[in-house]
Image (cartoon, rainbow, N blue to C red):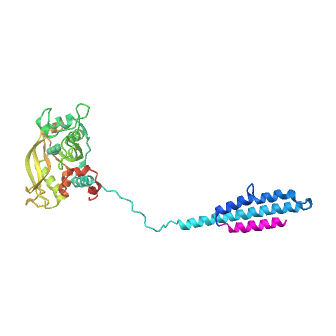
Amino acid sequence: MSDLTALVQRALDELRGCGDEAALRAWHTRYFGKQGEVLAAIKNIGAIPPAERRAYGQEANRIKEALTGAYEAALAREKKRGLERSLAEDAVDVTLPARPVPRGRLHLATQVMRAITAIFADMGFQVYRSREVEDDLTNFELLNMPPHHPARDMWDTFYTTTPGVVLRTHTSPGQIHVMRELCPQPIRVILPGMCYRYEAITTRSEIQFEQVEGLVIGERVTMADLKGTIVAFARRLFGEQRQVRIRSSYFPFTEPSIEVDMDCIVCAGKGCSLCKRSGWLEIMGAGMVHPVVLRNGGYDPARFSGFAFGMGPQRIAMLKYALDDIRQFWANDLRFLRQF
Ligand code: PHE
């Protein structure tokens, strides 16, 4: 009996001395494992004189339960302490400012396209989306360029493997689509979109670029309307001071055809490196819609007239921001793109 009393004393003392969960588990093995002292004490009952066995057995069981209870309480306490410790040590400071979320921005080409669209929207133009893959017929022939017409050399193209199907070289074939869709209603649209040309890639030319086409058809549309529209556009985009100059030119689908220049935004006409000392910057090609094209679109040239223009928003952006390399638009260099 006194052995049992000593055992319980020692076990409780050691239990109190356990500093962490591992020590507690080691203690449990020491006392309650297969070779453990509590089991040994219970088995020892055989060596007890029969008269004392009953009391011994009861005491051994009481000790076993008391120690198990003490162990479980100690283990629970230790687990709770461990949790509190880890909460304190690994605490997240929710008052720290959050990491900034990287924000995207609109590509320069998108920004310029939106600016151009907004200006024409104010003048009553709607946006018409035309296809990027065209047939030879619409890209050339219906625009008054029959096969082998020398003017086709102005637009070297990419052919697809389907005969007669090309990547459009300009947005002008969209004129045919709008006219055939809306005829005989009057038309006032811009046609923005990607164009493709098979040519050398340089600082001034790309095989892929955007254009914005304009088309106005009505019963009394004149060259004065074309000029007024272009001047208003140039002044909205580049400033009220801008002067516009018109030069005679040639396109198969307009007659007469013109090329439009704007006085240089850097030197206002005095001559500098941007305008190559000429004082003028070329901004678009334009003209009155050719009677053959009007007819191909379903309009009677005796009753209807119209004007069309075409410009390259990448070129426009290069003038506006004094950029010297058109290849930067699609090079995906964030150092370039983040500047706008
Ligand atoms: N399509 C012509 C080009 O790509 C531009 C243009 C459009 C000229 C409309 C006149 C009228 O060069």
Q: Position of residue 294 (x, y in %)?
A: 16, 39
Q: Nearer the viewer, residue 81 or 24?
A: 24
Q: Quadrant of the C terminus?
A: bottom left
Establish if 113 lies above or below 170.
below
Q: Position of residue 258 (x, y in %)?
A: 10, 47
The residue positioned farthest toward the right in the image shown? 51
Q: Quadrant of ligand 1?
A: top left
Q: Residue at x 45, y 67 (%)?
A: 96
Residue plotted at (74% across, 63% down): 69
Quadrant housing residue 129: top left
Quadrant of the image occupied by residue 21: bottom right
Tell me the quadrant of the picture where the N terminus can be found: bottom right
- Seen at 24% across and 49% down, the residue is 126
For this rendering, which residue is in front, 86 or 311? Answer: 86
Stretch in magenta: 1-18
- Res. 301 visible in picture: no
Q: Where does the image place residue 173, in percent across and percent down from the top left?
A: 20, 40
Q: Quadrant of residue 335?
A: bottom left
